[in-house]
Amino acid sequence: MISIANLFLLTAPRGMPLQVISGRGVFTKDDALNLIAQAQGKFPVGIKVLEARIGGIEPAAFTLRETLTSALLQDDVETQEAKALARMAVDEVCGTRICQKCKGRGYNISNWNGSAKQVLCKRCYGVGHILKTSLELAQTISVLLKREVTEDVFTQMYYDQYMDCVNQLWQESGEAERECKRLMRLWREVA
């Protein structure tokens, strides 16, 4: 079976033209586009997250930023703050860096007392990618708004809206990923 990453890399501008499935034939870019289009009918935001995060497709990230900005504006957030929060949320979900200490696994191998065992990565706290602290988030929004926003002000005024956006993007992404896996299983049964 083809992985979700390979599915979206097939459709990326610099992606491979086809993926060979062991014993099943060839899964082409057209097959991938068809499958993604079917999933996009149910989960359009989630598919855009996967396209931006895995495939690196900038128009998908732009669409996400615009969608989040519109949603924040409907919640009576000022225009500049809405744009900044949307940019930060999309960057958090689609542009996070892999933790260099655990190489994205979320754990490290410890040889304490001669026995090897998995230990939760202390740098990324088991997530596998670098999470920004509230101070770093405050500094980022300060740059985007071109005015000073302290960590306390960010935490009180913006943090809840920021995390709502991030959580919504992750949820949509997970639902779209499950739908893609379901469609790939159906494709495998037919092929």
Image (cartoon, rainbow, N blue to C red):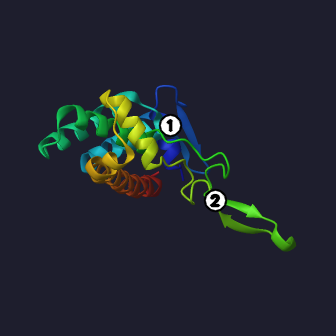
Residue 12 or residue 138, whichever sits in front: 138
Q: Residue at x 30, y 30 (%)?
A: 145
Q: Are marks 2 and 1 in contact (CB under 8 Å)?
A: no
Front: mark 2 or 1 = 2
Say few, some or many: other residues with alpha carbon within 10 Å of mark 2 (under 14 / 14 to 19 / 20 or more): many
Q: CA distance from mark 2 to mark 1?
A: 28 Å
Could you tell me how many numbered marks the image carries?
2
Counting from the top left corner in percent of width and height, residue 7 is at: 48, 43
Counting from the top left corner in percent of width and height, residue 188 is at: 47, 54
Residue 187 or residue 32, whichever sits in front: 32
Q: Is residue 102 visible?
A: yes
What is the secondary structure assignment of the residue under circle 1? helix
Q: Is residue 149 above or below residue 152?
A: above
| Mark 2 lies on residue | 121
Q: Which is nearer the N-term, disc 2 or disc 1?
A: 1
Left or right of 145, for residue 137: right
Q: Residue at x 31, y 46 (%)?
A: 153
Residue 140 or residue 175, whichever sits in front: 140
Which image quarter: residue 69?
Answer: top left
Which numbered dot is residue 111? none
Q: Is residue 99 above or below residue 9?
A: below
Counting from the top left corner in percent of width and height, residue 53 is at: 45, 40
Q: Is residue 28 visible?
A: no
- The amino acid on which the numbered mark 2 sits, given as a three-letter code, is Cys
Which numbered dot is residue 9? 1
- The amino acid on which the numbered mark 1 sits, given as a three-letter code, is Leu
Counting from the top left corner in percent of width and height, residue 139 is at: 42, 37
Say few, some or many: other residues with alpha carbon within 10 Å of mark 1 (under 14 / 14 to 19 / 20 or more): many
What is the secondary structure assignment of the residue under circle 2? loop
